[in-house]
Amino acid sequence: MANQKLDFRDYPINWNERGGRKWIYAKKPSGKWFTRRTIVSYFLLLFWVGVPFIRVNGNPLILLDIAHRKFIIFGAIFWAQDTFILALLMLSFVLFVVLFTVTFGRLWCGWTCPQIIFLEMVFRKIEYLIEGDYRERHKLDNSPWTTKKIFKKTLKHGIFMLISVAMTNVFLMWFIGSDRWIKMIQEPINQNISGFLIMLLVSAFFYWVYSFLREQICIMLCPYGRMQGVLLDSKSIAVTYDYVRGEPRGGQGDGDCTDCKQCISVCPTGIDIRNGSQLECINCTACIDQCNKIMHVTGKPPGLIRYASEAQIKGQQNSIWNARNRAYSVVLLLIFSFFVYTLFSRPVLETTILRSPGLLYQEQDKTLSNVYNIKIVNKTHDELPLELRVISHDGKIQMAGNTIILKDQDMYESTFILFLPKSEVTSDKTEVEFGVFSNNELIETYKASFVGP
């Protein structure tokens, strides 16, 4: 049993048979599909870096301000009161990912995943530039420490560290906004020491991921990679080896596969695509380009490795649509339609009025008073002058501060005192109704309790 040869599915592809790390030295890819993927990646990199600086009606295009429970997604602001609407949006996104995976396999990973984009299009390109292609890198890593090796490794890892710091700062702007970030970097470090330390910690994490962990994120840690084993079926489109056309390989018989193993040499996760569907495959298309080059040299038609489903390889299916992805599409359409409806039908104002905790009523000659906290969120793009009134009782409101003027999608927080005549307070807890008016027009009502003797 101890001498039994292990199959490729018996252990992770980046482990050796003794359980140690097996480093992947992927050949530098090139070809039509790689060029397309490079264009998409650079566009997404530009989007990722540019988003914090893009303004829509004075607000960031996207802002995930968790500290203040304020989320801006493509110009639409979601507050804590919009949790249900935001949940519908997130559910729609998850269902879209599921539908996309059912139909097109792990295309997200190879083309749009930030982990792969930064690894393949930023860090690996720097590595290729400094250390050379896969043979030179393998030779360098296994050579003694010379002045040349020390210089190359120091230069590479120094650049990796700088990029990691830059990534962290861009990542931070998605959560605090570019204006606040610019203000923070202009201030002395001792005024933001905790934020500075967090930035260094996150930068160190990014550096570790892209310098050492690398493809193990996709192979061992990413939950989406595990999901594809459940979501994919024989009709899902993925990077696939045409075994009907390619076998028997190695020039024996009529098979087109020459068994050159070039598809393995360019794979960033080190798999052999000819072994069939594997969770390590990120659909990066590097093997398609490399195989097409070999087919061109040998005078055979391209497409031995291509985007196809198992059913298409067997000649059983021509359309990518089937009952399963149609069902997912209907569910996605229903949920997203409900999201759009709730987004556009939400009230223009969101008011919350609560009694100040820990405070009882105060008694005057003819009145009783309670202290309240008020929060009003403006969900429109208009500036609204507001006035708070009591509409259920003959009471008086004393606001802390000036007139309420809410700017475009702004929030107002304050405290006020409500005075009610003693004759109108008939129990220890009386329900009162407030009205929020704009230009003498009732916009919203809110009920709260009034504590009396």
Image (cartoon, rainbow, N blue to C red):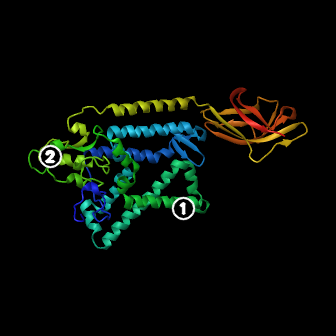
Q: Earlier in the sequence, mark 2 or mark 1?
A: 1
Locate the C terminus and report the quarter of the image it occupies: top right
Three-letter code for the amino acid on which mark 2 is drawn: Glu
Q: Outermost residue, left direction?
A: 253
Q: Secondary structure at mark 2?
A: loop
For mark 1, give the secondary structure.
helix
The percent coordinates of residue 315 (x first, y second) are: 20, 35
Q: Position of residue 154 (x, y in %)?
A: 37, 67
Residue with the mark numbered 2: 247
Residue 68 versus residue 347 in the image, above or below: below
Q: Which quadrant holds the N terminus?
A: bottom left
Q: Residue at x 36, y 40 (%)?
A: 101
Q: Please name the amino acid that badge 1 sits on.
A: Leu
Side (left or right) of 140 relative to 52: left
Q: Residue furthest front?
A: 1
Residue 197: give its label. 1
Instruction: Determine which of the numbered discs, if any, sits on residue 238 in the image.
Output: none
- Observer able to see residue 270: no
In the rendered view, would you say 197 is above or below 399?
Answer: below
Which callout, 2 or 1, points to the residue nearer the camera?
2
x and y, in percent, of residue 193 in the image: 58, 61
> Which of the pair 33/234 is nearer the observer?
234
Q: Residue 419's image quarter?
A: top right
Q: Is residue 102 visible?
A: yes
Contact (CB < 8 A) between labels 2 and 1?
no
Q: Nearer the viewer, residue 122 or 263?
A: 263
x and y percent of residue 30 in the render? 25, 50
Asked whether, in this view, residue 318 is left or right of residue 213, the answer is left
The crowding category of the residue bearing disc 1, from other C-alpha atoms within 10 Å (few below 14, some 14 to 19, many at least 20), is: few
Q: Hey, which residue is sitting farthest right in the picture?
A: 365
Q: Is 243 located above or below residue 6 in the figure?
A: above
